[in-house]
Amino acid sequence: MPPTLGGIPVVGIGFDAFDTCNEGPSTQFQLILPEGITFLEKGAFQCCNQATVISLPSTLETIPEGSFIHVKAKIVFPNGNPYFTAENGFLIDNRTNTLLYTSKSSGDFPLPPVKQLASRCLDNWIDENTTEIILPLTLEGISSYVFYDFPWLESVLLPNSMKNVENLAFYSIGVNSIVLPASILSVPAYCFVECYLDSVVISEGTQYIGEYAFYWNRGALANVELPFSVQFVGYNAFPEGCNISVLNPNTHFESLEEYQLRDPNGEW
């Protein structure tokens, strides 16, 4: 890629700039970005599925989550970079210790000791032979769609360091049981959508469970015990017919009317 276009320096890459899913080269290629580029917009390389290698500059400062959806290329920094590293197939933002992307070669290595998993960052690391995942003990947060559409994935072990899980973090995966550690204070809305849960353990310490958190469940989730710490349960948090045992008599279960007032644009 040239460093200038029409005599103007190229300093950033916009959304969908290198989409080759529907148009573009039909053969594989390597993509080299020039020095001087400082930022990518979210989805900059989305569907750049013909690239085998993407070479990024040392001047790059910003890589948003979700910049490499439907990409399998190896990421390299030939001139290094003060903010990012790409080793063993793992692209990491060193400032936030966030795993941004995994190439196909990363499947030969365990997950690195990061604090945050960015959206869709494990798409290439998880394959159809991956049925169980033990997450790093350093992990504190999981973004939306990290575990998306892995129906063969049966088990995900969350570390006790976990603090934050975003909505739709576990979406349409085959996990049949989950243990939420006490460090997770809030289970967000739609967190476990289209899973196959038979067992859910919510630890003492969790205070909030969002609407529809476990509602659309393909498993046989029959019983859930809510510890004393749970103060609020959002509308339709659990599947119909699931028996909820409540240890705290003051735990509030949100009604449909309350939910409509709180989120007028929500689904009901």
Image (cartoon, helix red, strand yellow):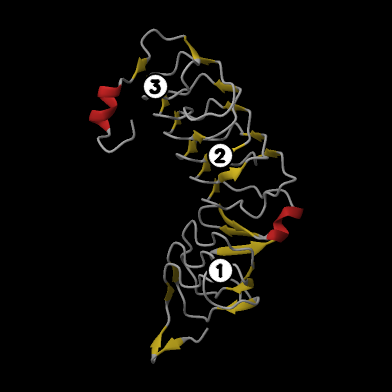
User: What's the residue type where badge 2 is placed?
Assistant: Ser
Residue 172 tag number: 2
Q: Would you say 33 lies left or right of 186 here?
A: right
Q: CA distance from mark 1 to mark 2?
A: 24 Å
Q: Dot 1: what SS?
A: loop
Give coordinates of residue 174: x percent, y percent: 63, 35
Q: Split into 4 quadrants, where in the image is the C terminus?
A: top left
Q: Nearer the viewer, residue 66 or 85?
A: 66
Residue at 67 percent across and 52 percent down: it is 125
Q: Which residue is mark 1?
A: 48
Residue neighbourhood size for the residue with mark 2, other residues' Cα within 10 Å, grouped as few (<14), some (14–19), many (≥20):
many
Q: Which mark is residue 233?
A: 3
Amino acid at pointer 1: Cys
Tag 1 near tag 2, CB within 8 Å: no
Q: Are marks 2 and 3 in contact (CB under 8 Å)?
A: no
Q: Residue at x 39, y 21 (%)?
A: 233
| Left or right placement of residue 107 versus residue 203 in this view | right
Seen in the picture, residue 78 relative to 9 is either above or below; the reply is above
Residue 249 appears left or right of 124: left
On screen, residue 245 above or below 98: above
Residue 132: image quadrant is top right
Cα distance between the residues tagged 1 and 3? 41 Å
Whether residue 150 can be seen here: yes
Label 1 neighbour load within 10 Å: few <14, some 14-19, many 20+: many
Q: Position of residue 75 (x, y in %)?
A: 62, 68
